[in-house]
Amino acid sequence: MSPQLSIAKHSPFIELDRNTWSRLAETISVPLSASEIANLRGFGEILDVDEVQQVYVPLSRLLNLYVNAASSLNHMTNDFLGASQRRVPFIIGVAGSVAVGKSTTARMLQAMLSRWPSTPNVQLVTTDGFLYPNAELERRGIMHRKGFPESYDRRALLRFVSEIKSGAPLVEAPKYSHLYYDIIPDEKIQVTSPDVLIIEGLNVLAPDKSGALSISDFFDFSIYVDARTSDIERWYINRFLSLQQSAFQNPESYFKKYANLSHDETVARATSIWKSINEPNLLENVRPTRSRAHLILSKASDHSAHRVLLRKN
Ligand SMILES: Nc1ncnc2c1ncn2[C@@H]1O[C@H](COP(=O)(O)OP(=O)(O)O)[C@@H](O)[C@H]1O
Ligand SMILES: CC(C)(COP(=O)(O)O)[C@@H](O)C(=O)NCCC(=O)O
């Protein structure tokens, strides 16, 4: 047997190409209208009814199976313990690079999962709320490391997730604004005992370096959104160009300093931010967590998912 085949044989993942994956749920129809899908789509993405039918319907069905199985196990465990039945949220982590399209995947899952009768209440939080405020990043001398593991208040994030998993009826998270590029001091996001909570962020699968608990220890399922580095760089630059024409024109935007750049200057600025912050973070911290995921959604250069890897166990 060639070394390549034996590596594949001993991989913890089953690999499915798009056609094989899409056939797993072809009898289930898309529960969203074309305009609902358009509203969930991020900048530059091609998400359409075909993509939802072929990629997200099977994913949502698989997750529904996991949620129902976790709920049965929870019931049986409580019976065994003689404890009262109390349901705690099923937590799904969504990881991947800046600009890979995590937010669209997470929003799509939220919309799809909430259509299942067993999980009408699906809530979504992003980990950017747990970034230190810019003033604190400046104080620590890590303003140029936004998105790196050390730029987050990891203790607060861990407390947040463990409170949710302990069944607390209301848990609050700080709120981040892409417009201000900073934490909004007086606003909070509330998590109110959902059936499913999706937690999306760059580093959600990162283990704690000192061996202590990390938030992924509280996940029931996790997804890594993957693509080639060169494709993600192009998506980042194209999105930056679109934002320069829209969001950066807002006088309140942190990036208003880029509002009058020419096309070439904007590309140069985006490339420099990508090369100095987001690509190193992807290579050093984010992609190394990929094999910790239960499922890897692998995207082709047009943003469509072309392959799914699912853990065998
Ligand atoms: N500077 C910005 N101004 C406004 N919105 C932004 C800015 N940067 C990113 N976004 C938006 O924030 C969301 C999260 O982006 P990001 O963290 O890169 O994750 P992803 O692209 O994987 O969803 C996306 O919807 C993106 O369009
Ligand atoms: C806010 C982010 C760190 C993403 O945070 P996440 O929700 O993934 O924890 C990222 O979108 C970002 O703004 N990075 C800084 C570098 C840049 O401006 O591209």
Image (cartoon, helix red, strand yellow):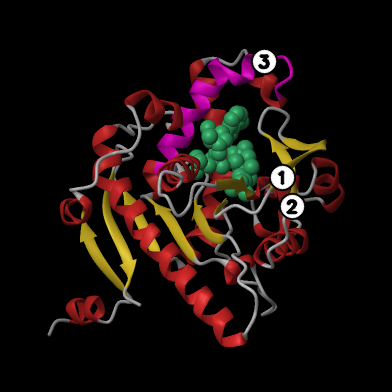
Quadrant of the displayed image that contains ligand 1: top right
Query: Please, what is the dominant secondary structure of the magenta stretch?
Result: helix
User: Residue 190 bears which disc, if any?
Assistant: 1
- Check if mark 3's residue and mark 2's residue have beta carbons within 8 Å: no
Tell me the CA gap for discs 3 and 2. 34 Å
- Which quadrant does the C terminus fall into? bottom left
- Which quadrant does the N terminus fall into? bottom left
Pick whichever of labels 3 and 2 is earlier in the sequence. 2
User: Residue 250 bears which disc, if any?
Assistant: 3
Residue 99: percent from left, percent from top: 49, 40
Residue at point 77%, 59% (across, down): 156
- Check if mark 2's residue and mark 1's residue have beta carbons within 8 Å: yes
Pick whichever of labels 3 and 1 is earlier in the sequence. 1
Within 8 Å of ligand 2, the CB of disc 1? Answer: no
Within the magenta stretch, is there residue 205? no
Graded by Cα atoms within 10 Å as few (under 14), some (14 to 19) or many (20 or more), the crowding at tag 3 reads some
Which region of the structure is painted magenta? 232-253
